[in-house]
Amino acid sequence: MLNIILFGAPGCGKGTQAQRLAEHYDLYHISTGEVIRSEIARGTELGRSMEGYISRGELAPDSIVVEMVRDYMRTHADKGCIFDGFPRTTAQAEIFDTMLEEIGSKVDVMIFMDVPEEELVKRILLRGKDSGRKDDASEDVIRNRIEVYRQQTAIVADHYTKQQKYSEINGLGTMDEVFERLCKVIDEKR
Ligand code: ADP
């Protein structure tokens, strides 16, 4: 059983690669961003409470996101999982570790996908053209998300480096090239 955290700035390709990896290794895939978007689309109370944060490109509160993941794990703990967009703060990582420990599980590896900022903005603007995601349409919101990533999320790498679970790959190149680099890291952990 493998639990993998795909890590990197917005637009680095986590979502695309997470989907492929989940299929290739027969793992579940949870994107907290997608769970939040689906809550918003369904107009739930939880969704409404998070809408403002998302549209400004800020993080949703740790307490809400952590409970969403806890809820997911209740029905998805029978095989490994790819976590995409979570944990995004050190507080989330600490609670996540405890949560997994309680169910006799753990994080196996965090893989950072390294992509330069200008490429991130380019990719997200392009994606925004068909994704319909409001937070992908404005360059200001995109830059804010990257800034939030720098200020609050990048440091989560230290948390898993201390546990000797951190790896990084070059996130530039074709989707196949990036996929192969990720597989190489994962295969070494199996
Ligand atoms: P991206 O990686 O392009 O930012 P995501 O789909 O991962 O896209 O996330 C979209 C938005 O959802 C984020 O900007 C943030 O507001 C919110 N979000 C997603 N995951 C988390 C999380 N773990 N903690 C707090 N907010 C989150």
Image: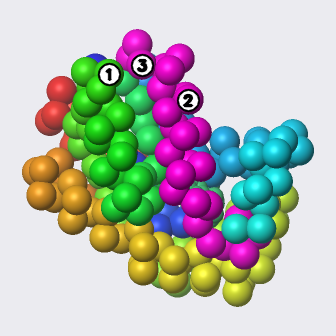
Q: Contact, CB < 8 Å: mark 1 with mark 3?
A: yes
Q: Earlier in the sequence, mark 1 or mark 3?
A: 3
The magenta segment is: 54-79
Question: Residue 77 shows which numbered tag?
Answer: 3
Residue at image x 78%, y 60%?
A: 51
* Left/right of residue 131 with respect to residue 15 in the rendered view: right
What is the residue that sits farthest to the right in this orientation?
43
Quarter of the rendering containing residue 5 = top left
Residue type at numbered disc 3: Ala
How many angstroms separate mark 1 from mark 3 (CA)?
Answer: 8 Å
Residue type at numbered disc 1: Ile
Question: Residue 71 shows which numbered tag?
Answer: 2
Q: Quadrant of the N terminus?
A: top left
Classify 10 Å Cα crowding around label 1: few (below 14), some (14-19), many (20 and above). Answer: few
Q: Position of residue 9 (x, y in %)?
A: 47, 68
Quarter of the rendering containing residue 101 = top left
Q: Earlier in the sequence, mark 2 or mark 1?
A: 2
Question: Residue 103 shows which numbered tag?
Answer: 1
In this picture, is 82 found above or below 175?
above
Label 2: which secondary element: helix
Residue 77 part of the magenta-drawn span? yes
